[in-house]
């Protein structure tokens, strides 16, 4: 512990000694530890069910653990580090309200804003400040109209003389990993911000200011409750970056990247250790941080906890029953497994390479809406589909956001630019990685990305060198021909990308709309399977790695040819043909991490 607690500690010990002398029978009767226990979760994403088939836990397990810990310890605090209210049908059908009800029932004390807390619009996000019994905190969530913060930057809790400050931090990636227009006024001006400027420095300064203010108020221990993550794509706003550029934190409870971190020691700006921890996703773990009266911190991750609080379980089931019949309605069937994870390694690949589920969704967009091209970002495909009956609930799990389908006129160059933005992190993960229908293209990961994004994650420019090449568009006879940058095509996608600047691209927002929010995205998927595939997803989609629409190579580029205004594809065709069987079975690139 890095706080100066000498006098407080002496006073605490003297008081404890006096209490022991004066009332030993009381102490013996209570038999509770004076330790402070912080139970925490992050990225639950509506994973409410206790004892799920995946072996993860649910809110009824968390409630049971909380009661167990409360019986043993004098002080218990329950924290959520973001992304609780979105992810499955229970969230989609209630705009997150059911999740708030459940969290209130259990008794959460503090919460951080995750990017997906904004998925139902700013009104819902702001209503969390009043609808939730938990106090939402964020030291960098700014109202740009007033220049102030939307909510309290931190909260100090006095545990019998030991004061602990919890500093909230929201990810600046919320702009592009939720919906950009939710943070804008009707004229497209940003009216909310996350201290995203200065290549991270504005965020570091906001966090440091809150640390210093909390310390000045007498905080003995300072813990960050953030939704920042550890993935390289999230730099310079990762928890690693914040710790390395600040001083005074003792621990950091993190979310966003779905990382499982039991308790990693990370050096701060002064070389002091800060305990970093994160519980993964869907409550696969529950974090338990123990803080002694002297301020010493240890933490652990609990998994496989099987005790269930009966009252909470009944309460969750009563909510689920309200929409159970609709969710269990069978809408289609699949003869094949439709994946978001690699069936061999188990690692998520939907954000880094082609998959059969990505092909299916993109085909649904293009075919149902009658467009030349269909596109769907990997971050918008949230769940796999197992062989067998497909229910309405299964489809909502794939597309939980409730995005509306649009068709827009787009130039070939705008299509190329969108693919280039999507490919900038390959072979690493990127939520804007585009699955396509009516197109084929190659990504050469040996070429350094020349994409320049602004501090809100929006496209600024693309340099002369490009990673995406050999882009071809489907012809009426089933063949493919090179895309024409100057031609106009029709593009089917959701309002998130076409009208709201999602995935970091806003060049479609002023284009001519052919179809404007005509159908919800999950219904498009249902209609495609039912009407175009005869109700059954068949062998056409059997290969988990897709139909060869996206090829990833790692080959030094050859000089540009200038063909069709695009850089030459840095691929030796002989090598590609020789590796065709491998391309068929999996991408030539290895994805490097999960988000």
Image (spheres, grey):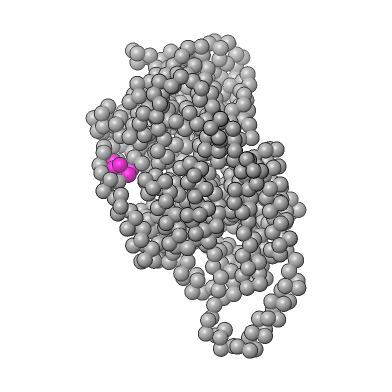
Q: Is residue 578 above or below residue 496?
A: above
Left or right, 211 with respect to 50, comes to: right
Residue 214 shows up from this direction:
yes
Magenta span includes 507: no
Q: Residue at x 59, y 28 (%)?
A: 459
Quadrant of the image occupied by residue 454: top right
What residue is rendered at 71% in x and 64% in y? 218
Whole-percent x and y of residue 581? 41, 26
583 above or below 169? above
User: Vertical placement of 566 versus 322: above or below?
Assistant: above
- Whether 390 is among the magenta residues is yes
Q: Position of residue 8 (x, y in %)?
A: 72, 72
Q: Does residue 168 show up?
A: no
The residue lying at 52 percent from left, 58 percent from top is 134
Question: Image quadrant of residue 293?
Answer: bottom right
Q: Position of residue 573 (x, y in %)?
A: 49, 17
Task: Give the residues drawn in magenta, as a range.
Answer: 389-394
Q: Nearer the viewer, residue 122 or 12?
A: 122
């Amino acid at each position: 512990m890095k706080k100066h607690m000498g006098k407080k500690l002496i006073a605490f010990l003297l008081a404890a000694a006096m209490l022991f002398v004066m009332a030993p029978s009381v102490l013996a009767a209570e038999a509770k530890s004076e330790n402070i226990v912080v139970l925490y979760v992050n990225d639950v994403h509506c994973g409410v069910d206790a004892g799920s088939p995946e072996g993860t836990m649910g809110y009824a397990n968390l409630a049971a653990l909380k009661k167990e810990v409360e019986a043993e310890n004098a002080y218990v605090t329950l924290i959520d580090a973001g992304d609780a209210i979105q992810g499955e049908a229970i969230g989609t059908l209630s705009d997150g309200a059911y999740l708030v009800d459940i969290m209130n029932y259990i008794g959460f004390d503090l919460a951080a804003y995750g990017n997906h807390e904004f998925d139902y619009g700013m009104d819902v996000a702001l209503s969390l400040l009043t609808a939730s019994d938990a106090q939402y905190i964020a030291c960098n969530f700014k109202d740009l109209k007033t220049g102030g913060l939307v909510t309290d930057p931190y909260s100090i809790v006095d545990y019998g003389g030991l004061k602990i400050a919890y500093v909230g931090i929201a990810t600046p990636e919320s702009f592009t990993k939720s919906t950009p227009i939710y943070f804008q006024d009707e004229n497209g001006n940003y009216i909310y911000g996350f201290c995203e400027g200065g290549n991270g420095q504005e965020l570091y300064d906001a966090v440091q200011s809150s640390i210093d203010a909390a310390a000045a108020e007498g905080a003995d221990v300072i813990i960050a409750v953030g939704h920042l993550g550890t993935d390289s794509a999230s730099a310079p706003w990762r928890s690693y970056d914040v710790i390395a550029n600040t001083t005074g934190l003792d621990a950091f409870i993190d979310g966003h990247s779905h990382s499982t971190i039991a308790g990693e020691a990370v050096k701060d700006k002064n070389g002091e250790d800060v305990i970093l921890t994160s519980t993964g996703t869907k409550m696969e773990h529950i974090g338990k941080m123990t803080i002694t009266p002297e301020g010493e911190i240890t933490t652990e991750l609990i998994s496989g906890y099987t005790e269930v609080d009966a009252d909470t379980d009944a309460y969750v089931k009563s909510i689920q029953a309200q929409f159970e019949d609709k969710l269990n309605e069978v809408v289609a069937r699949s003869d094949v497994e439709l994946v978001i994870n690699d069936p061999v390694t188990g690692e998520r690949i939907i954000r880094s390479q082609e998959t059969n589920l990505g092909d299916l969704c993109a085909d649904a967009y293009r075919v149902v809406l009658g467009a030349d091209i269909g596109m769907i970002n990997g971050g918008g495909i949230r769940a796999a589909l197992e062989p067998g009956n497909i229910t309405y609930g299964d489809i909502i799990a794939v597309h939980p956001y409730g995005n509306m389908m649009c068709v827009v006129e787009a130039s070939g160059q705008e299509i190329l630019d969108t693919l280039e933005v999507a490919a900038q992190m390959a072979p690493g993960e990127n939520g804007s990685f585009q699955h396509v229908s009516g197109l084929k293209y190659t990504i050469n990961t040996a070429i350094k990305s020349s994409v320049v994004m602004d501090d809100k994650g929006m496209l600024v420019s693309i340099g002369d060198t490009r990673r995406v090449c050999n882009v071809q568009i489907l012809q009426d006879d089933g063949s493919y021909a090179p895309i024409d940058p100057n031609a106009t095509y029709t593009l089917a996608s959701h309002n998130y990308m076409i009208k709201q600047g999602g995935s970091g691209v806003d060049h479609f927002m002023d284009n001519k709309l052919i179809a404007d929010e005509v159908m919800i995205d999950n219904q498009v998927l249902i209609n495609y399977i039912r009407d175009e595939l005869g109700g059954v997803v068949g062998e056409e989609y059997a290969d988990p790695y897709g139909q060869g629409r996206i090829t990833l190579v790692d080959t030094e580029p050859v000089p540009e040819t200038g063909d069709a205004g695009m850089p030459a594809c840095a691929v030796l065709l002989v090598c590609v043909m020789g590796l065709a069987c491998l391309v068929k079975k999996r991408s030539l690139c290895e994805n490097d991490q999960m988000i």
